[in-house]
DNA sequence: GTGTTCCGTTACGCTTGCGAAATAACCCGA
DNA sequence: TCGGGTTATTTCGCAAGCGTAACGGAACAC
């Protein structure tokens, strides 16, 4: 069963993560771009344009554009699928891993504080 | 001390929340707009344009625009400050509370699943 | 009362992202 | 091999958001 305090803690974490995301002036990612990042880095490969579009319920061109932007930032990479050359696989980069781990640190810090375990 | 599994769980929650945010077709909020929502609803009043801009390190016009959009959606409201009539206070609405509690449910559900406590 | 400072908004030109439709490359079955 | 289905991308016109700078109104010092 879920109670109010865990609910508050969950939103507080979300707030902290989102605030961090907004405050970063350099890689300023939109919600869609960030969602794609998290899916690619947290869920099992392979990740295709079609799959990402379906999962997030957005259009394929929207995914293509997000990949362009994220690719330009070197946060992830397109890798042609050798088996089916119509498809591309979206794969991780070192820079992207570092980026996400920084975000994770901030969220975790917030969670820690919210639990009163300083 | 923080370990890898809690870090993963934190990012998974963030992913779930962000996916939910992206999938909503109606009120499609940007990161900035959502961050403002969460600050207004989770932190103690009063909330001013200048304060929000400083906290999120964005320009005041950006906050004004976000308030316009969020106000049009009835997710929050401007309330003139009687004491200092140059300032405005950003206050909560019923619709905004409902909206955020829905998001909270999704995050919490994800956290539950990640902890293996289905 | 007057000049100054502070707060939020508006005006401006610009960049980015959007969906729908068209396009290009590819797979596969008949 | 050829034609229909699939995958990702490009093109198009358009809407929303951005930061800088200018503005109007309110507070405040003197």
Image: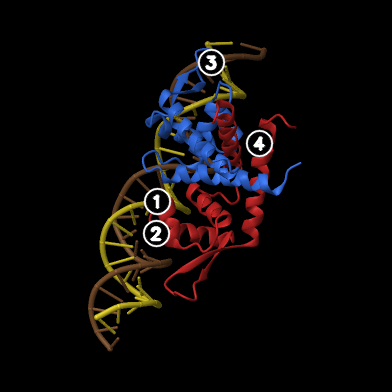
Chain colours: A red, B blue, C yellow, D brown
Residue indicated by mark 3: B84
**Which chain letter goes with mark 1?**
A
**Which chain letter goes with mark 2?**
A
Same chain? Circles 3 and 1: no
* x 54%, y 54%: residue: A37
Residue indicated by mark 2: A60
**Which chain letter goes with mark 3?**
B
Mark closest to the chain's N terminus, 2 or 4: 2
Real-space Cα separation, disc 2 to disc 3, in angstroms: 49 Å
Q: Residues within 10 Å of mark 3 (few under 14, many from 20)?
A: few
SS for callout 3: loop
Front-lying residue, B111 or B72:
B111
SS for callout 2: helix
Residue A111 numbered tag: 4
Which of the two marks, 2 or 4, is nearer to us in this view? 4
Front-lying residue, A19 or B14:
B14
Q: Are marks 2 and 4 in contact (CB under 8 Å)?
A: no
So how many labels did they put on this image? 4
């Amino acid at each position: 069963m879920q109670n109010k305090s865990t609910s508050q803690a969950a939103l507080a974490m979300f707030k902290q993560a989102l605030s961090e995301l907004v405050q970063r002036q350099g890689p300023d990612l939109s919600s869609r771009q960030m969602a794609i990042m998290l899916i690619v880095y947290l869920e099992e490969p392979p990740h295709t344009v079609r799959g990402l579009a379906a999962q997030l319920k957005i259009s394929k061109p929207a995914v293509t554009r997000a990949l362009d932007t994220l690719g330009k930032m070197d946060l992830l990479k397109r890798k042609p699928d050798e088996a089916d050359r119509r498809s591309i696989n979206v794969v991780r980069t070192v820079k992207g891993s570092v980026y996400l781990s920084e975000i994770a640190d901030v969220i975790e810090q917030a969670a820690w504080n919210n639990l009163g375990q300083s």
